[in-house]
Image: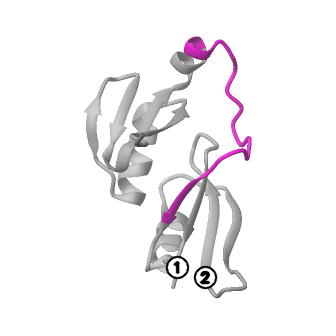
C-alpha cells in the first residue's frame, strides 16, 4: 500500500492555492475547480463539496491533525509568514525543543494546523 495524497478542506480554493504557492512554493498539478491537486500530493477540497460527500460539518482548528514540513531557513520562512498579505494566526512562535530543533506552528487561512521545523539532525 502507498499513501498517494493528503486532502485538506478549504473555503476558497483560489485563496488556498495562493497561500500554498506563495509560502510553500507548491504549484497546481490538476485543477478541478472544486478539488485541486498541488505538488507534493496536497489536495485542496472545497468545504461545501466535502461536507456533502461525507454528510457532516467540517470544524476548523480542530487540532486533530497537522501538515508537517521541514525548512532549513526557518527564520526566513517565519519572516515570509509575518509579511504575508493577510494575517497568519500562530499557535506558537519560533521556539526550540529539547533536542535543539527549532519549530513554528500556525493555521492556514482555513484553520488547518501546520508545523514547520528545521531538518532533524
Task: Tally the marks.
Answer: 2
Mark 2 crowd level (few <14, some 14–19, many ≥20, 10 Å Cα): few
- Which dot, 2 or 1, sits closer to the camera? 1
Dominant SS of magenta comes to loop
For the point 51% across and 16% down, the residue is 49
Magenta region includes residue 60: yes
Q: Residue 6: x and y, percent? A: 47, 41
Image position of 78 with respect to 62: above or below: below
Q: Which structural element holds mark 1?
A: loop
Image position of 13 with respect to 103: above or below: above
Q: Which structural element holds mark 2?
A: loop
In the depicted view, which residue is nearer to us: 14 or 114?
114
Q: Is residue 48 left or right of residue 31?
A: right
Image position of 26 with respect to 32: above or below: below
Magenta region includes residue 65: yes
For the point 31% across and 24% down, the residue is 32
Name the image quarter holding residue 61. Answer: top right
Start and end of the magenta stretch? 52-69
Image mark for residue 101: 2
Q: Is residue 5 left or right of residue 120?
A: left
The quadrant of the rendering that contains the N terminus is top left
For the point 68% across and 71% down, the residue is 93
Q: Residue 106: x and y, percent? A: 63, 58
Q: Residue 31: x and y, percent? A: 29, 29
Q: CA distance from mark 2 to mark 1?
A: 7 Å
Q: Which residue is mark 1?
A: 120
Q: Residue 59: x and y, percent? A: 71, 31
Mark 1 crowd level (few <14, some 14–19, many ≥20, 10 Å Cα): few
Q: Is residue 55 left or right of residue 82?
A: right
In the depicted view, which residue is nearer to us: 57 or 101?
101
Q: Are marks 2 and 1 in contact (CB under 8 Å)?
A: yes
Amino acid at each position: 500500500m502507498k499513501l498517494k495524497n493528503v486532502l485538506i478542506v478549504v473555503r476558497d480554493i483560489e485563496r488556498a492555492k495562493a497561500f500554498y504557492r506563495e509560502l510553500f512554493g507548491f504549484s497546481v498539478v490538476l485543477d478541478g475547480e472544486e478539488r485541486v491537486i498541488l505538488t507534493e500530493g496536497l489536495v485542496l477540497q472545497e468545504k461545501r463539496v466535502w461536507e456533502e460527500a461525507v454528510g457532516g460539518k467540517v470544524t476548523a482548528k480542530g487540532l486533530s491533525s497537522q501538515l508537517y514540513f521541514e525548512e532549513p531557513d526557518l527564520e526566513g520562512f517565519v519572516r515570509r509568514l509575518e509579511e504575508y498579505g493577510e494575517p497568519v494566526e500562530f499557535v506558537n512562535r519560533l521556539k526550540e525543543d529539547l533536542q535543539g530543533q527549532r519549530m513554528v506552528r500556525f493555521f492556514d487561512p482555513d484553520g488547518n494546523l501546520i508545523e514547520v521545523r528545521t531538518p532533524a539532525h
